[in-house]
Image (cartoon, helix red, strand yellow):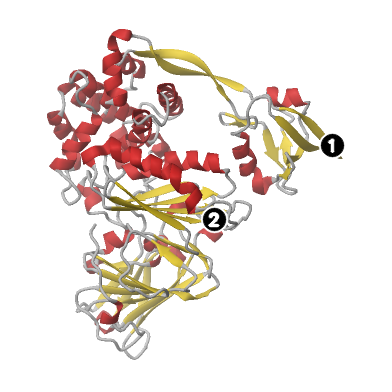
Amino acid sequence: MKKILCMMAITASLWNLTAYGQTKPTNQVQVTIDLNTIKDDRVTVTVTPPNISASEIIYHFPKIVPGTYSEDDYGKYIDNFKALDKKGTALSITKTDANSWKISDAQKIATITYQVNDTYDIEDTHEIFSPVGSNIDAEKNIVLNTHCFVGFFDDFKNLPYTVTIPHPGTLWGATSMTDSDASTTNDVFTTSRYAELVENPILYAKPDYTTFNISGMDILIAVYSPNGLHTAESISPSLKTMITAQKNFLGKCNSTKKYSVLIYLSDVQKANDAHGFGALEHPTATSVVMPEAMDSVELAEQLKDVVSHEFFHIVTPLTIHSKEIQNFEYNTPKMSQHLWMYEGVTEYFANLFQVNQDLITEEAFYNRMAGKIASASTMNDTMSFTKMSENVLVKPYKDQYLNVYEKGALIGMCLDIIIREKSNGARGILDLMQKLSAEYGIQKAFNDNELFEKITALTYPEVGEFLTTYVAGETPIPYATYFAKMGVTPKNIQIPGNPFIQGQTPYITVNQTTKEIIIRPDSDLNVFYSELGLKGGDILLEINNKKYNLDSIYDMITASQNWKDGEAITIKIKRNGKEQLITGKTKIPTEDKVSFEASDASKTKLKEAWLKG
């Protein structure tokens, strides 16, 4: 997810940021986020506005932010909102909705103050995706997604923002912004406008980071691991390999000079920690949340897929986007029709580059695309993708959002195949993205209803026909027809399954009162259970000397994904009230799936251009 401006440095000494009585600048918004006086997981923020001539003004927090497709109302996490004049006298305020405060006698405002609550502690009360939320753990960690802490005035969104952050010397702020204060206990960041500030998260924690340069791009990898199970040093090698491959794949399509990967690893055994795993893209950064309990191999694999997706957002929508994205409305959002491109093509690139750069095999790539076909088939396959995208914030369209990563990626694949076929392998969808980048770019947006016409003009009539029929239209895509153009046809395969879940059907359940994990007595158990003599109703207490219950069930399922056939395993269970130890060897269940294989040798050259060109 989602999901990406130029910095200006300014010395902290230019402005006196005391609460009252300072000379107010007329051309910027000043903000102080105080990380030294955190109380009850609340951070105090002070805002000094530019000179205001209006009799009243409204200060907003976003309802929604770029890269997300849900209305999250960040103003709900703001307490004790006050507007003060130069003498410290409170001005009259009215809260007009969940995110907005109207201030009377606005020309008298000297400062605005409020407290910010974090969202990780209360994730069971809202649906804010963890990488978009905030964490406030004094002296340990601050996940500072700036839209959670700083709001905006309608008339001043395009003024520069100078943000000063006093903080403990033990914490270091990882970000792609430039800190203009050399102090180890105070940071000063300046952005050209509010939209740029929102796109620059900061991860405050004990310093744990690595830096390296890839083809002129400075990369920062910062990690917060609460129990020290992972470090930036251990994570960085695989990310360096991946980003190098992405840079090679993109070629001239990317000119980003600095990129930060901010990784927060959640302690899933704590109820009040983040449980929404994934990432959010920004122009020069990715915010990632993952479970700390993952082993290093599984974490590296997950980061490869998640971070690669977010990195490719530098192409779209960060370089290629509509006016709805360019002039994003934080409180009255108007969504674009083109999630098939913003998320779908991005997800396709995140898979294609891996086979292109020999990080995965051709077979693995086909299996991934086949998996997306299977997943897309469970969604509404006759819903217009452009209509769904334009209305993604409301039902029934919002229920289909996840299809942007499944059918959206397949749309990208089919377009790639059409362009490769019509150009005899010379060009593909990356070439199209390069041309669109040259036509538009970061500062120039396209009109939503003109994109199909522009793409058709840059490619072939068949591309326009596909977009009209299968993306704007309601006709399901005949994927086998497009694979066949590359000499690739369906085949049946068997893949390893998970001992604890098949598809959407679990073999285990939990007792919510005792938190015990129970093998379901009403399920047809797979070979993993029969081979070990496990029965329905057995309570799983430990596996390989590690205790599990409801709080750590995710860890158990994640660990099982790395089990191999024939490995020794020890399971402690409770059966009929008595504990017993079961030892044996794992038998991993298999699942029948449909995938694809190259079967037409006459099209090998074209297929190689598609996957390796």
Tell which of 89 and 369 is nearer to you: 369
Give the image location of residue 239, x and y in percent: 42, 44
Tell which of 298 and 591 is nearer to you: 298
Seen at 19% across and 18% down, the residue is: 424
Specify which label sits upstream in the sequence, 1 or 2: 2
Callout count: 2
Is 487 on the left or on the right of 203, as rendered?
A: left
Residue 407 lies, with reference to residue 479, above or below; the image says below
Can you tell which of label 1 and label 2 is closer to the viewer?
Answer: 2
**Mark 1 closeness class: few <14, some 14–19, many ≥20 residues within 10 Å:** few
Residue 250 lies, with reference to residue 16, above or below; the image says above
Give the image location of residue 396, x and y in percent: 40, 38
Residue 97 lies, with reference to residue 343, above or below; the image says below
Residue identified by numbered label 2: 225
Give the image location of residue 435, x and y in percent: 16, 36
Q: Kindly identify the amino acid type of the residue bearing the numbered disc 1.
A: Gln
* Residue 580 image label: 1
Kindly check if marks 1 and 2 are in contact, taking CB atoms under 8 A apart as contact. no
Q: Kindly identify the amino acid type of the residue bearing the numbered disc 2.
A: Ser
Image quadrant containing the C terminus: top left
